[in-house]
Every structure is written in C-alpha cells, then in structure tokens.
Amino acid sequence: MLEERLARLPDAPGVYQMLAADGSVLYIGKAISLRNRVRSYFQRGADHHPRTAAMVARVVDLHTIVVSNEVEALILEANLIRQHQPPYNVRLRDDTHFPYLKVTNEPYPRVQFTRTVKDDGARYFGPYTNVQALRSLIELMRIVFPLRTCREPIDGKRKRPCLQYHIKRCMAPCVGYQSESEYDAIVDEVVLLLEGKQEPLLARLHAEMNAAAQSMAYETAARVRDRIVAVRRMGEKQKVVWATRLDMDLIALARAQGQACVEVFFVRDGTLLGQEHFILEGVGTQSDADVLSDALKQFYLARKSGARAIPKEILLQCEVTDRGPLERWLSEMKGQRARILHAQRGPRAEYLRLVQTNAQKNLDDFLSHQELREAAHANALTELAEALELPGPPHRIECYDISNIQGTNAVSSMVVFVDGRSKRSEYRKFKIQYDRGPNDFAMMQETLRRRLRYLVQTANATDPAKKERFAKRPDLLLIDGGKGQLQAVVEVLDELGLAGIPVAGLAKEHEWLYLPGESEPIVLKPASAGLHLVMRVRDEAHRFAITYHRKRRAKAMLRSRIDALEGVGPTRRKRLVEAFGTAAAVRRASIEDIAALKGFTPQLAAKIKHELEADG
C-alpha cells in the first residue's frame, strides 16, 4: 500500500500525514512538491537523523491533501498539527489547555475564564500561561468594571437585585437599574483595556467623569474616577520600549535537553504590555529557524483578538526559511500587512537579547522543576513498589471506581497514571449494564471484564482499534475499596487468566492498602510519597466517576420531567437532552433557544418552560 501511494504522489503543493499501523498520525508536514518531499523520506541510503529514521520505520501509510499554493499548505499544516498533536512534530506543550479570557457574545456580555476557544462570535484574549495571574486579572476587572457574572435572563421579570448589586459588583441590569447601552459602554472599556489601549480608555473615562460631574451626578462621577485610578494602577508596571508608537511582538528561543522555550514580548504603542513563554516538545536537532517557524504557526493560529493578536511587525532572533508564506498568511488573518523581521544590530537586536535571556531563564526553571518532579515521582513509585512487594516501580497504574445512587445511573471510571503522572488521553468511562440493584462488587467485576478482556487474545476482541487502545498491560491495578472490592477483582483476574497482574485496594476510612490473600493491611506513613501518590490516583478516579454519574443523572432527571409533557416524544426528548443536558439549563434557556431546535415551535417551547418552572 505504501509503495503504491509513493508512486502516485502528485508534483503539487500540499500537506502530508505519516500514519502508523494503528492509524494514528506520526508526523504532518507541508511541501511545495509532495512527490519530491515525501519520497525523500524513503530513499535507500538516506542519511536521516535517528529520530526521523525511527519515525520512518513506523510509517505504514500516508495521506496527502493537495492545495493551491504554499500559503494554503502552511495554514492546513498548522491546523492539522493542532488537531492531531503528532509525536514527531514540534508541539506547543499542552497548548490546548492554556486558559483564555472570554468576553461573551450575548446581550449584556460577561467576562469569563475558559480553556476552550469556539467559533461563537465571542472575543477571546490569550492564551495565558499564568493561570493564577489571569484569575487575578478577572477578579480585578470585576471590581473595576461592574459586569454581571450570572446567567440570569434579562427579561424584566426579576423584581429585586441580588447580592452582587449591593456590594457594587453589578449594576443590576436584570431589574432595569442599568440600560443595555450603559452596560455596553462598560464592556467597550474592558475590551480597550484588554487590547492595551489605555490612553484612549483613560480619555474616554475622563470625558465620562467630567460629564457626570457637570450634570451633578456625583456618585456616578466617583465610580468613574475609581475606574480611572484602577486603570492607571494596572498600567504602572508597564515599560516603555521605544519612543515611537510601535505594535510589535519580539520572539526569541532557548534550547536544552531536546526541549525549547519560546519567549514572546508584546509591545503595543511602544509600551511593553506583557510576555508569555511556551515550552516546545519534539524539537530534536531541528535548526532554530525551523523550530521558530513551527512555533509561529501554532502560536498565532490560536490568536483571536486583543493585545496578543497579530501585530504589524514580528521581530525574530533569526531568519526563518518560509518567511514569505508566513507573512502572507499572517497578513490575511490580520486583514492588513504583517511583517516578519530579523534584527541583526542596533537597539532592536539588543532588546531581543533580553528576550532570549528571559527564554533561557524560563527554560532553566522548567527543566529544574521537571527534574525535581521526576525525582519525586520516582521516589513515590519506589516506595510503593517496596510496600506492595512489586518486582519494580509500577510504570503504568490503572485505578477504578464505581459511582451510583442505589444502583441507578451506575457508572465506573478508569484513570491511568504513567510514571506517576496522569495520562488523561487514556482515561475511560463505562456505563454499567448491571441492573439488578445496588451491587458495587458486581459492577466492579463488569468493569474489569470489559477492560481486561482486551489483554486476552480471544475472539471477542473484534474491534482492532479498541483492542489497540486497551492492549497496554498495567503494572498495578488500584481499586477504590477494601477487602470485598479487592476479592471481586481477584476473581475476574483468575477467570481471565491474568492473575499475574498486581492488584491492591485502598480503603478510604484509614487510607490503608490491602493485598489479595493478606488479612492485615499495609499502613504507609502519613508523609509517605507512595501514599500520597495512591491517594491522588484514587481521588482522580473518584472525581472522574462522579462527574460522569452526575451528568447521566442530570440527563435522566430531565428525561423523566419531560416524559410527561404533551407533544414531546422520543425524538424531541432526545434533542432537548442533547442540547441542554439538565432541567436547570432548560429553565435558564430562552423560549427562542428552545424553539430553535429542530421540531420545536415557540408555543411548545413556552409550554415546556412553563411546566419546568412550575416544577421548581
């Protein structure tokens, strides 16, 4: 198959994806000529770097997408890398988890913390690498700019304001104390601040304060004065970089131990507004130019608006090979020309050296923290192995928990820790099929049978993809429970011929560990790193299980409430549950939101809301 695909490669620009035997994406690249670039990987005697050679050895298939030009290839490559996170590409570490500040797209918008960027018309600022700093910023903004935080519908039905109004955190538009135009003016001020436009914002606030004072609205003028003071304080720590009013990002790189740190300084109107740094994985022996090019594509792909949006100039510590396509792509996203520059001498080169110094410091801090963390993980795993008499530190720990209420909406969870760190991509949740009342032992046995059968080469492992995901053998099974739950699991292991897998139970009451066939528990010291590890694994399994259970229970409650509604059959009920999830969410939704669902009318939507609100 691979040979045939190589023979049919087009001599055209496009993107290629290298695929492994299990269908996963190993590497994504772009090329002016797909034929020449991709075939070069598989030429006999090719002098590849060991990392590249290891990747090529795993390739069994490839997919290509032909595009019109190099810019389209660059955009598609960046999007696919962000989507698939291939192991052999340079990747922004945990890029999908960085937080953003969101100004919602709705009447009377709210300012929110989020980790997900959606195409919903909202304005996003970020991503931010310092979560605590972002939360502090949001808290400060809520004090300075009294915007609502609730999801209360602004429909004129509310009779009195809530506590937020009385502590001056909201001006109560829900009861008509503030008009939409007055509210939107404050939202505009928030956006100006986030975009780094403090001077226009201060001028606007001064005009507003003077107008209020002239009309003798002294309380309003005092509130605006307080906002002016707060805005000035928020800008006190900003540093002027150049006298000219430049909009520029300065980007430099530091590398060590196969990882890299990209440092970005944000300069707007000649003022340094802030900085971010990002750890890159998979840099290998790539040149600085190639690493910066890959980082730029992923970095600016996430930008939506605000002070961290695409500036007019991007100043790099070294030249990048695909500067032309990158400039055209960035200019297209910005809507006007964006330039990529390389400073070799003068004040800009000196300032870039400062950026690079920060990059080196942040990389050193990261590597030092990583070493300490890995040492702590190794110590915890060694302690655990000694306590449980394992042959060696458990590389892969799987933990299971059951969640139900009197046997209803029963679910179970499986969480995975590899080398002492959680691996969320391998978490699994199970909807329990056992329906003969509350029986945690039977439910745990069902869960383990459904998971462990993929370690046994039998005919029931019919799904190759699922078998591949479950084929990794755990070094330790950890069960949330004592002797009873542990014995139930041992029976399953014996039944499947997997008695060689170590298993232990962790009882919540005293945090004691139990082993099969042992009457006395293993009591680890309260300060033991091994005990802290198993408690963290157990708590994560419990959190994952109960979150899934609550979600199922909420949907079941909604189904039960709408089952009795006239005019809502199985299809409409399914659409209502999928759209809102809970009865509370339906009550909060507007009639227009419900009526927008397929098969619903405004009359039916009003009836549903009325009956659910009557139920409380």
Image (cartoon, rainbow, N blue to C red):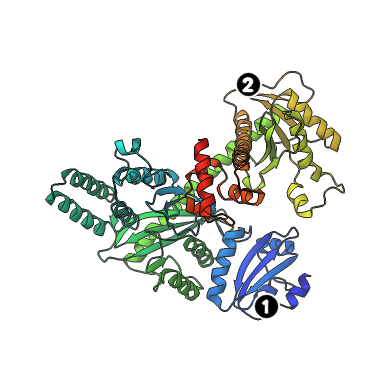
- Locate residue 82: give its quadrant: bottom right
Marks 1/2: CA distance? 64 Å
User: Total marks drawn?
Assistant: 2
The kind of residue tagged 1 is Arg
Q: Is residue 316 left or right of residue 3?
A: left
- Give the mark toward the camera: 1 or 2: 2
**Farthest top residue?**
520
Q: Quadrant of the N terminus?
A: bottom right
Looking at the image, residue 331 lies above or below residue 305: below
Callout 2 secondary element: loop
- Locate residue 198: give its quadrant: bottom left
Q: Nearer the viewer, residue 282 or 437?
A: 437
Residue 18: percent from left, percent from top: 68, 65
Numbered label attached to residue 509: 2
Residue 13: percent from left, percent from top: 60, 77
Callout 1 secondary element: helix
Q: Is residue 187 left or right of residue 464?
A: left
Looking at the image, residue 571 lies above or below residue 33: above
Q: Counting residues from the N terminus, which is met first, the one under dot 1 or under dot 2?
A: 1
Numbered label attached to residue 235: none
Q: Which residue is mark 1?
A: 35
Looking at the image, residue 2 lies above or below residue 393: below
The kind of residue tagged 2 is Glu
Q: Residues within 10 Å of mark 2 (few under 14, many from 20)?
A: few
Looking at the image, residue 203 lies above or below residue 320: above
**Farthest bottom residue?**
11
Q: Nearer the viewer, residue 605 or 146?
A: 605
